[in-house]
Image (tube, grey):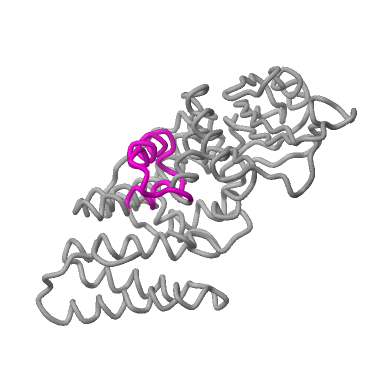
Amino acid sequence: MGYFLEDPRSYEKEIQKPNLGWGGHQGMPTDTPVLELDASQAPAVFDEAVAALAGQPSESQVSRAAGDIAAACDAGYEKACQFLKEQTRLPERIEGTVLHPQGAGAAPARAEYAVVIVKCRIETDERVRGCQAIEDGSGRPSERLIPQLEESRYRPWSLAGHAVATPYTFTLNLRRGGTGGDDLLVEQKLGWARMRVAHFPQSTGAWINLAMQLAVHTPEDPDYPKVLAQAYALAPLQKWLATEMAWQRIQQGQHTAALMALRPVLRRSMMGSRPNPYVLETAAAAHFGLNQCTEALAEQQKAVELLPAEWPAPERERFQRKLQDYRSACAVPKDVSAGTGPR
C-alpha cells in the first residue's frame, strides 16, 4: 500500500504534514437507507428511483432514491453508477472565509499545532447550521471558528437538481509560528495521533489519522489491526480504509469478507475519472483466493493499465508480476493463495 494514490491528496503526502485531519462531505445524507441488492434486482430498483426523482420529491424521497441508486451501482449496474456520476453535485463553498482564531498577532517562536473537527449541516437555503465540535484544541479554538463557519454559505448536496440538507464535517488544521523546518518528528506525530484518539474517541478523523500514521510508519505495531478495525467501523466507505481492511482480510484467508468490504468503494472508484489501481489490485487478490480466475485476471489487468506512466518502476513491475502469476496459476489447477508474497 506504499503508493495508494498518485494524487496531491494522497495519504502518503498528507501523512508527512505535522497534523492530519480527515473530513468533508459524507457522500450523501446520513439517513439514506442502505440496501443490499443482487444484480437481478438492480435495474428495477434503479428505474423506480429515477422515476421518483422526475417529479417534485421531498428531501426524504431524494435521500431514499440516492440510497437505492447507490445500492444498484454497488450491485454492478453500470447505468446506476453513471447516473450518480453525472447527476450528483457535491457541497461547495459559495462565500465566506475562516481565519485563525488567534488572529494576526505576534506568532510564537516555536510552532503550535491543533486539529479542530466540526460537524455541521448545510441546509437547502445554503446556510451552515447546527455546528458541534467533534475534536478541539487547547483553549477551545472551535468556539471562535464555529461562528465564522455559520456565517459562510455553501451549496448543499444535490441529486438530479434536488437539494438535500447535508451533514458536513469541517476539518481545520491550525498552525501558528515556527519555521518551515520545524515539523514534528515521526515519534511526535505518532504520539499526537494516539493522544487525539485518547482525548476524542468519538472522532472519526482521529481514528483514521492514527490508522494511517501506523500504516506508514509502524505497520508492524501490534495495535495496528484493532486501530484499523475501529477506523473502518466508523468510516467503511472511506477508500483507503476499505481497501486496507480488505487486504488484511485476504491475508487471513477471508476472501469473501474482503470483497464485501471492497464492494462499495470498488464500484465508486470506477465512477471516477481515474479509478484507483490499488482498489482493483485488492479485488483481484480476493477473487483469486476464491478461485474466480476470470474476475481476478480482469481486475489485475485493469489495475496494470491504470498505473500512471511516471509510477516507480519497482511498483509497476510488482503489478505486472502479479498479473503474470495469476495467468500462470489460472492456466493449471490452482494450489496457491492470493495472499502470499510481498505487496
Main secondary-structure element of the magenta-colored stretch: helix
Which percent across, then down, holds residue 15? 57, 48
For the view shown, which residue lies furthest in the right direction? Answer: 105
At horizontal 79% and vertical 44% (from top left) the residue drawn is 179
Displayed quadrant of residue 45: top left
Q: Nearer the viewer, residue 198 or 236?
A: 198
Residue 294 against residue 135 in the figure, above or below:
below
Frontmost residue, 237 versus 198 = 198
Q: Which of 312 and 61 is in front in this view?
A: 312
Residue displayed at 32% across by 66% down = 342
> Where's residue 102, x and y in %?
82, 25
Q: Quadrant of residue 233?
A: top left
Q: In this view, does 17 lie to the left or right of 27?
A: right
- Position of residue 7 relative to residue 116, above or below, is below
- Badge count: 0
- Give whichever of 294, 23 is nearer the camera: 23
Is 119 included in the stretch rendered in magenta? no
Q: Position of residue 67 (x, y in %)?
A: 42, 39
Q: Which residue is drawn at 69% across and 18% down?
A: 140
Quarter of the image where one finds residue 23: top right
**Quadrant position of the N terminus in the picture:** bottom left
Q: In which quarter of the image is the C terminus?
A: bottom left
In this rendering, would 105 be left or right of 147?
A: right
In the rendered image, residue 53, in percent from the top left (x then y), is placed at: 51, 41
Using residue 150 as the reference point, say whether residue 119 is left or right of it: left
**Which range of residues does the magenta coloring cover?**
217-246
Residue 220 belongs to the span the image colors magenta: yes
